[in-house]
Amino acid sequence: MRITDIRFGKLRVPLKTPFKTALRSVDAVEDIVVMIDTDSGHVGYGEAPATAVITGDTHGSIVDAIRHYIAPRLIGAEIADLNRITHLIQSSMEKNTSAKAAVEIAVHDLWGQLYDAPLYRLLGGGDPVITTDITISVDYIDKMVADSLSAIERGFESLKIKVGKDIGVDIERVKAIYAAVEGRALLRLDANQGWTAKQAVYALQTLEDAGVRLELVEQPVKAQDLDGMKYVTERVHTPVMADESVFGPTEVVELIRMRAADIINIKLMKTGGISNAIRIADIAAMYQVECMIGCMLEASISVAAAVHVAVAKAHSITKIDLDGPSLCAFDPVDGGVIFNESEISVTDAPGLGIREIRGLELLS
């Protein structure tokens, strides 16, 4: 099975409600879909969103990076040579992690198809059923409480609460949600780099003193501020998770060395795909550091790939934040991963098992 061509499409899926964080507000998933053709007739699918404020990738830069730098290296490559292909992808250019991730996902999809096995089995196996949290967007307090209660009614047992806009209101938001859902759901805070280190300590200590018990707080300070992250980690009881501070394995090693966070958030769009995500999970396991696997605002092609990684690396990936498909008004993908609110299950279909993508706009 050799690569003969790489094609592109655009997928747009409206959200059930606008997605609001300290960094942005979005009302639809708009992603680039990568399709890798082979001489055997098999097609591998990958996907990447434009997240300029996080990874620096735009739709245009994703397509150009693949078309001009990655694709020329891969045409004619044998899918069985997976390690060589992932090296070619990762060494094709600096940064551009989302573009690299989309291609790696499609290649791994083909790798599973080559050996007629679901991807997670080739990555090591595991229990093909996992449970995700769901994101509660930053909004008025009453709206966030109502959204939290609605999520619980839909079966979600972990809620990721977006904060980071106004520290005083943030504290009141969390107190109100905790009072409304106490005992029925775990709360995870995501500050999206919205606080300073001292603000984070103040907010978390205030919540802890008020009896609010949080499962974790995600990226309370700016991505580059590892000293600030360490400052927070040393002064609060709530576990601190690094997200934007950690893209690849090298940064994970440094964060662990500094003891700057308790948990690491793996996202394929940050790591540049599956190969580095696996490396991060294995490094974290060596040091007994927990990982979460998350996603950007993505549809179910790339999120399916993250699900396969989560299943195969469950020994270190203990927390799941793969709610992108649950936030969409509908799932445009028929395939081997089934997203049913909080429960995500994987079938025995080869690779990612994708059969059809509805509404895909092909790009020239």
Image: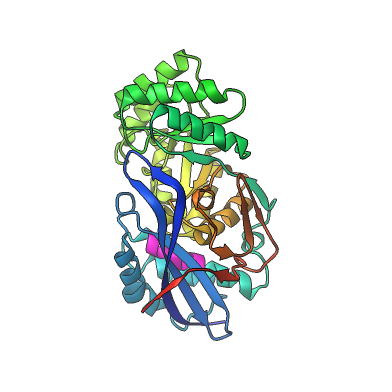
Q: Residue at x 49, y 57 (%)?
A: 299
Magenta stretch prevailing secondary structure: helix
> Observer-nearest residue: 35 or 284?
35
Q: Quadrant of residue 304?
A: bottom right
Task: Please tell me in which quadrant of the rendered image residue 65 appears.
Answer: bottom left
Left or right: 306 as drawn, with respect to 48:
right
Point out residue 84 in the picture as x, y percentages from the top left corner.
Answer: 48, 71
- Check residue 99 for magenta coloring: yes
Residue at the farthest top position: 209
Direction from residue 9 to residue 179 in the image, left or right: right
Does residue 107 appear left or right of residue 270 in this picture?
Answer: right
Q: Is residue 157 visible?
A: no
Is residue 252 visible from the viewing direction of this image?
A: yes
Q: In the image, is residue 285 above or below residue 240?
A: below
Residue 274: percent from left, percent from top: 50, 59
Residue drawn at (69%, 61%) of the image? 347
Near-viewer residue (128 or 324): 324
Locate the N terminus by quadrant.
bottom right
Q: Residue furthest bottom?
A: 39
Q: Position of residue 285 (x, y in %)?
A: 56, 43
Quadrant of the image occupied by residue 140? top left
Q: Is residue 105 magenta?
A: yes
Say which residue appears at 52% left-offset and 20% top-offset: 179
Instruction: Give the image's coloring scheme.
Output: rainbow
Decide: is 218 above or below 364.
Answer: above
Residue 224 vs residue 167, the one in the foreground: 167
Specify the segment rendered in magenta: 98-106
Q: Is 316 drawn above or below residue 231 in the view shown? A: below
Image spot of residue 286 (x, y percent)? 55, 43
**Picture quarter with the C terminus:** bottom left
Q: Nearer the viewer, residue 334 or 71?
A: 334
